[in-house]
Image: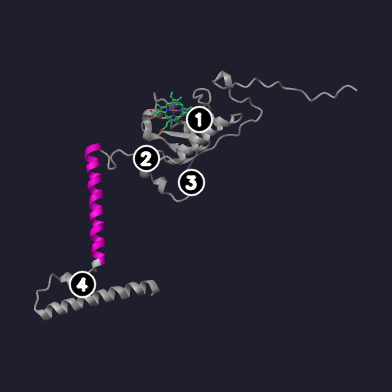
Amino acid sequence: MSIDRYGKWKAAEAAKEARRAKRAEKRAKGEELSDWEDDPDAPGSVSEEDSVGMVLAKTLLILVLVFMLSGKFVTDSLVWGYDGKWVHWRTYWPFEGSGSLFTEEMLAKYDGSNPNLPIYLAIDGDVYDVSANRHTYGPGGSYHLMAGIDAARSFGTGCFKDHRTHDLRGLDEGEMKGVEHWKAFFKRSDKYPFVGKVIHPPIDPMSPTPIHCDENKRNPPKQTQGPAKRPEL
Ligand code: HEM
């Protein structure tokens, strides 16, 4: 028996002894004894501490059941229609970075066009379930263009139509901050559970960067210069 368990056992024995003494004293005075639970030696007798704990646990359980059943009755949902991350099992999965792996094609299926599927959105590789906000990310929603895809670039530039890509090459400092802001927004969101990662094929470094929707931010096309000429001697 460990020291801790021994200590607890000793305390419980002392409490029992006190109850026995109290009963003996009552008996000696000819007073009536209350029900059998007061007898520490009765089968199934519980300590006072245990019984308070049991009452609290039962009360809590009853309150939770009442809350869930009334939710089912009023909103047809045991959790009152809440669909945030706390009701998704992945939130409680202890392994960091776990989750599903998506190809871009797989992710595209979750753009909200199929009402029986959840809506997923990716930002810089991280996939989130945004079904809790179907009216925003589903068809006709103001941010539907971000659904079913990793449109990280558009989070930085605001070019929702033209920058539906994870390609972040050439973003300026402010735009990169925008991407980081939205990455952090989804990461700490209570509404949108993390679902997994999307695997992108590598970006060809020689391919042109996507054209900005804001004319003022379009970089002048870079002149391809040949090797520097050797000055004439
Ligand atoms: C770089 C530019 C922008 C980005 C990346 C962006 C991104 C977003 C995102 C991701 C949401 C959804 C938040 C959530 O899921 O709760 C949102 C919501 C919203 N944004 Fe933007 N936004 C931008 C600019 C703007 C601008 C300029 C306006 C106003 C003209 C605007 C108006 C709104 C509104 C009204 C909502 C709430 C929509 C709703 O819940 O239905 N946003 N924004």
The residue indicated by pointer 1 is 155
Label 1 vs label 4: CA separation? Answer: 67 Å
Which tag, 3 or 1, sits closer to the chain's start? 3
Q: Position of residue 1 (x, y in %)?
A: 38, 75
Looking at mark 1, is its residue's CB closer than 8 Å to ligand 1? Answer: yes
Q: Which residues are magenta?
A: 49-75
Q: Amino acid at mark 3?
A: Ser
Which of discs 2 and 1 lies nearer the camera? The answer is: 1
Per the image, label 4 sits on a secondary structure element best described as loop
The residue indicated by pointer 4 is 43
Q: Is residue 110 left or right of residue 229?
A: left
The residue indicated by pointer 3 is 98
Residue 84 is labelled as: 2
- Pick out the residue farthest to the bottom: 28
Q: Is residue 175 left or right of residue 38?
A: right
Label 4 vs label 3: CA separation? Answer: 49 Å
